Amino acid sequence: MHSKRLILPLLVLASAGGVLLAQGPPPPPPPLIQPPSPPGNPVTLAKTNLGKVLFWDEQLSSNRSMACGTCHVVSQGGSDPRTHAANPASANAGPDGQLGTSDDILGSPGISRLDAAGNYLLDPQFRLQPQVGTRRAPSVLNAAYVPQQFWDGRAQPQFVDPISNNVILQAGASLESQVLGPPVNSVEMAHQHRDWNQVAAQIASSLPLRLSPSIPAALASWINGRDYPALFQEAFGTAGVTPVRIAEAIATYERTLWTGQTPIDAFFGGQQNALTPQELAGQAVFTGPGQCVVCHVGNLFTDHSFRYTGVRPPAEDEGRFAVTGNPGDHGRMKVPGLRNVELRAPYFHNGRMATLEDVIEFYDRGGDFNAPNKDPAIHPLNLTAMQKANLAAFLRRPLTDPRVAQASGPFEHPALFSGSPLVLQSFGQGTSGVAGVVPSMLALEPAYAGNARLTFALDHARAGRIAALVVGNGSIVNGTPFFGTDLYVDLAQTHSLVRVPALAGNGDSGGYGSTSIAIAPDPLLVGVPLFAQWIVFDSTPGVRFAATAPVGGVRF
Ligand code: HEC
Ligand code: HEC
């Protein structure tokens, strides 16, 4: 393997003859090989399987609504397909707090703001809706080659136990370090002040991938009905479900997500016809007048450095500076690798470039902002329309591993609960209260048998009122007048009515609250319908009630 790596570039260079040398492009790098793992955490099949289960398990988050895979869909380029301009739920208002301005960010919807008991808290921008962070999710594909994780590189190669603070892995473990972030981050996966003991305890008592509507056969047969402690026993030798092991297993799975079967790998390996003439012309722009190789170099198309390229004013996101405190690092972001880049639009850390063509135009005009530390390689390029089109062609097929979009091999993965038909669906309509406002309901959590805390939230109600969540096994599809309210839950079958004493918030439409029900761990409940609707009581003459549209689905 090693001798092959050394010889191949020389062969390619020799066969290309003096023309290549005369124009001066660097010799082709070797094709990609399996990423390294830290000596203390070698890749094994059991650990990979366990990591895959954990990565796709929404039970890793406080309210069981977010997995790593929610924001990093491996089969869609390893980033978040929910992030795009047409999805208002993926917008963050940015430093000015105003939506619709140039500092807005397109990011990943995470978790709603929750207190430690799982009750909803009001967020100034998102109210009760899932919060969106201030950066777009980078790809987890090939992250195993990245020395320091995150756009600013703050996840370090040395891995430290979050409970004991002991150093567990000396080097090469930025993936393990990275895992420690999201499960306790109150915008991504956690209720306020969640700690790693709570994360590990919740996993230990959860059934592996209980919420997934479909698990690849090989993984399902590996799980084979076992609980998490049994899976940890196989992967680590003993049954302890610890934070360190959760991080080590997930990092191990990520080390299998490398994409070395692209046309460019064949080309680097000496197969000259692996690229079309247009793609070759695009490569010549990439390495020539486009100057892309100054930063996007080697077989990963990155030198892993941090650069300020003029995507935004540095003050909007200080980037690398937050880690180093070095003024020269203001606004610098990590140079992302470009493998599979066509699968993960939109682009840049703020998600503000919708297409690769937009990115190319950005570079062609020399970036959008200036700062003293702007990289000298970013300046107007004056590329022709043909050069731009060729460059775009080079960034697409040659850099894309077809197994990713096909979700085959290591990229096959369990389906998520979120987005599946298992999520309770809104139907019918609500009834307005004072000021004509129809209150709204949020029901994002899984209605599975054994969920001891299934929380429903209510918003845009009249503050200070008493509200009740009506939960039933049946619905009256067309609604029946109930003191002037379209009530869809069949009261004859109602098994619970949960009152919220006085809604928090202000005004006729700023009231909010939440409450939870428990679904017994009874297999007989699987398949039993579940309907829920909020009623807000009001003493105003002629109003009396307001109601949300109901939600319905089945327990699973
Ligand atoms: C709510 C969405 C969300 C969830 C959930 C989430 N991530 Fe991320 N991930 C992001 C964002 C956003 C970033 C970039 C953050 C930054 O740079 O500050 C990121 C960065 C990363 C990176 C760094 C990649 C690089 O090239 O620097 C890795 C690896 C990663 N996440 C893995 C995971 C794992 C593993 C989990 C689960 C334990 C997870 N993520 C959960 C959104 C998410
Ligand atoms: C000076 C270094 C530098 C040069 C030169 C450069 N890039 Fe980049 N590139 C970056 C950095 C840094 C980012 C991330 C910027 C950000 O998000 O703020 C990036 C991001 C990208 C992205 C978006 C990837 C993603 O996942 O968001 C693409 C595509 C890209 N570059 C292509 C190119 C092309 C094509 C060229 C040549 C025309 C080029 N780059 C030249 C440093 C560079």
Image (cartoon, rainbow, N blue to C red):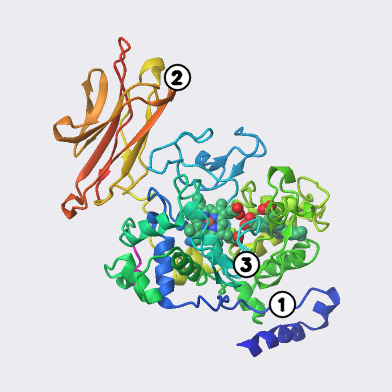
Quadrant assignment for ligand 1: bottom right
Dividing the picture into quadrants, the one containing residue 275 is: bottom right
Q: CA distance from mark 3 to mark 2?
A: 50 Å
Amino acid carrying label 1: it is Pro
Dividing the picture into quadrants, the one containing residue 150 is: bottom right
Circle 1 sits on which residue? 28
Report the quarter where the N terminus lies.
Answer: bottom right
Circle 3 sits on which residue? 146
Circle 2 sits on which residue? 507
Q: Nearer the viewer, residue 520 or 218?
A: 520
Q: Is residue 178 above or below residue 549?
A: below
User: Where is residue 445 shown, x and y percent of the image?
Assistant: 35, 45
Q: In the image, what residue occupies the spot 76% across and 67% down?
A: 287
Q: Residues within 10 Å of mark 3 (few under 14, many from 20)?
A: many
Instruction: Look at the image and say whether residue 218 sits in the magenta stretch.
Output: yes
Q: Is residue 547 above or below residue 149?
A: above
Residue 107 is at least partly visible in this image: yes
Considering only order in the chain, which callout, 3 or 1, is on the residue closer to the N terminus?
1
Instruction: Look at the image and say whether residue 272 sits in the magenta stretch.
Output: no
